[in-house]
Amino acid sequence: MAWIHGWLGLLAGWILFAMFLTGTASYFRPEITRWMQPELHLRAVPPDMAAATAVAWAQANAPHDEQWYIYLPDDRTIATRIFTRPRPDAAAARTARREEVRLDPASGRPLAARDTRGGEHFYRFHFQLQLPHPWGRWLAGLCAMFMLGAILSGVVTHKRIFVDFFTLRWGKGQRSWLDAHNVSAVLALPFHAMITYTGLITLVLMYMPWPIAANYAKPAAFAAEAFGAEPDTPASGRPARLVPIAPLVGAAMREWQGGRPGTLIVRNPDDAASTVTLVRDGNDGLNARGGSISYAGATGARLSASPPPGPAIETAGVMLGLHMGWFAGPVLRWAYFLLGLTGGAMVATGLLLWTAKRRRPGARPFLGLGCVERLNIGAIACLPAGMAAFFLANRLIPAAQPGRADMEVAAMFWVWFGLAALALLRPVRRAWIETLAVAAAAFAAIPIVNASTTDRGLLRSIASGDGLFAAFDLAMLAIATGLGFAAWRISRAAAAPRRRATVARVPAAVTELADAA
Amino acid sequence: MPLEAALLGYAALANLARADARIGPLPVRAPLLPPRIARAAGIALALLSLVAAFLRFGPYQGAVAWFGLVSLAGIALVLLLSRWPVLALRLWLPAALLALPIGMIGA
């Protein structure tokens, strides 16, 4: 079982580390996006007001389109997102949707801000790994399955799970890595098991499509039965205006006992047969899949509502909610974030333990060990540097530069893989110290670059009570401190054997092995 | 800030660690409890933190919050224990006492 645990963890470890780190960052996806568009100074407004301003914009700019999709803001996203789909062209097989527009929910005016993927980049990378569809999702799923296997086999392998519950010993080489791996795994085991299993369940219909294929002619038929069919009334050809949208939002919120709408879908908006569907957002309950209510757009009459979910759909929705953490308020969101970092630490210490177990004092590392050591550096030290480069690129690339969103993403990968490639030229210990130091310096530079390129630097944010920007900069400094501390610890550990060898003529690695024996 | 479940969780785990023979011989000096009493206090405080989590986060999020916050409290405790074991264990009383006003403010 220990053999299975070790190899499952090793083979998927580097990708799992990247998934953990980017997934953890994604718990602050809206906040990251807002930080990456510092030009925007928006305030949250009630959903009925945001819906009214968005519909007014759509009526002025796309009155005859077939559908409007309006993503209403909440307290964290703040901006309204809207895209419309024109009426199908008889010559075209399928009509492409128009470019997404972001609106100020208070005024309904389109927002002008730098183009960026924002927090969405980390979120997408977390399960798509920047690979073409569907390969990224398949690879992420495979790694998640390895992770689940590693968790189960780890629990079986770890015979002293309760005895070593509080044990963490520093400076004892392999034993310290084992302690750190055990502590980060065991103390947060409920989170690790939950996040891995629910992550797999989130994409289970992709990984296991056969039950639906065997029972339904089309996947849409399954979706209609599971989640309820939305009205699909064809346009009547008789023009009509939409009723005011705010009362419909109010009616839906009363029916949901205070639940907020997250999405507003308007079909045939200029027709007498128009419909307005309000989809509840998943932020006010564990179930991330909210129900929907449809109204006649011309009269405001309630047409239908999605049926109450059955036990299986409810369970799937709760699992999705547990994984995404949308329901979490600030304290629980930070708890998710810190537990995600613990997951990253668990994977990283597992990878380091694999090399610590196989390193022999004075011997040249065999090929496999050398490869694992280099890949460890590339993942554990260089990925954070890449993530910092993503943020730095956001501030350093001119706001009006065409294609800048892609350039930000490219900056992350160039720094990540470039630094990993450069680290190949250095001895392993020096490579660890230098890559971690580069990552620390990059994170420390973020608040400085932010202050020098925007009017929302740390001191000004604190003075003006801008909690998001102040917290972001402080988080960057905390991460820089952590990475710098790691570099400093390794540099001390690298110096210690030389000192000990000089004084006592006992190789440190022998002491470490004796400790671990 | 609704952290009473985490603070009570810390106090609970600190007492359970105190009762663990592997931590080593420590003086029975306030606020450290004798090992047997510490074990009982640890279990009682763990139950109290569970109740606090449900009261604060409601019936649906309570269990999620409890697992998450107690896990984090455990990690903080183990990190402290690895450097300053006596201080880490003694902090159980301030943590438990601090939980009281925080819980009352939120109630």
Image (cartoon, coloured by chain):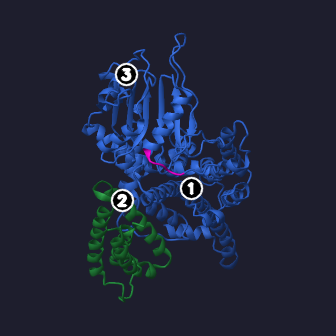
User: Where A164 falls versus B101 (above or below)?
Assistant: above
* Residue A448 visible, this angle: yes
Residue A123 rendering spot, x and y as whole percentages: 52, 44
> Counting other residues with Cα less than 10 Å from the Cα at mark 1, is it few (<14), some (14-19), or many (20 or more)?
some
Q: Earlier in the sequence, mark 3 or mark 1?
A: 3
Identity, as a three-letter code, of the amino acid under mark 2:
Ala
The answer to whether residue A489 is left or right of residue A260 is: right
* Chain identifier for the green-coloured part of the image: B
> Counting other residues with Cα less than 10 Å from the Cα at mark 2, is it few (<14), some (14-19), or many (20 or more)?
many
* Chain identifier for the blue-coloured part of the image: A
**Picture residue at 66% right of the left edge, 75% below the top:** A500
**Picture residue at 39% right of the left edge, 15% below the top:** A236
Secondary structure category for the residue under label 2? helix
The residue most toward the top is: A91
* Residue range of the region highlighted in magenta in the rendering: A43-47
Q: CA distance from mark 2 to mark 1?
A: 36 Å
**Residue A444 lies in quadrant:** bottom right
Identity, as a three-letter code, of the amino acid under mark 3:
Asp
Q: Share a chain, discs 2 and 1?
A: no
Of the residues tagged 2 and 1, which is closer to the observer? 2
Question: What is the chief secondary structure element of the magenta stretch?
Answer: loop
Residue A89 rendering spot, x and y as whole percentages: 53, 14
**Quarter of the image with the C terminus of chain B in it:** bottom left
Which residue position holds label 1? Answer: A355
Secondary structure category for the residue under label 1? helix
Q: Is residue A380 magenta?
A: no
- Total numbered circles: 3
Which residue position holds label 3? Answer: A232
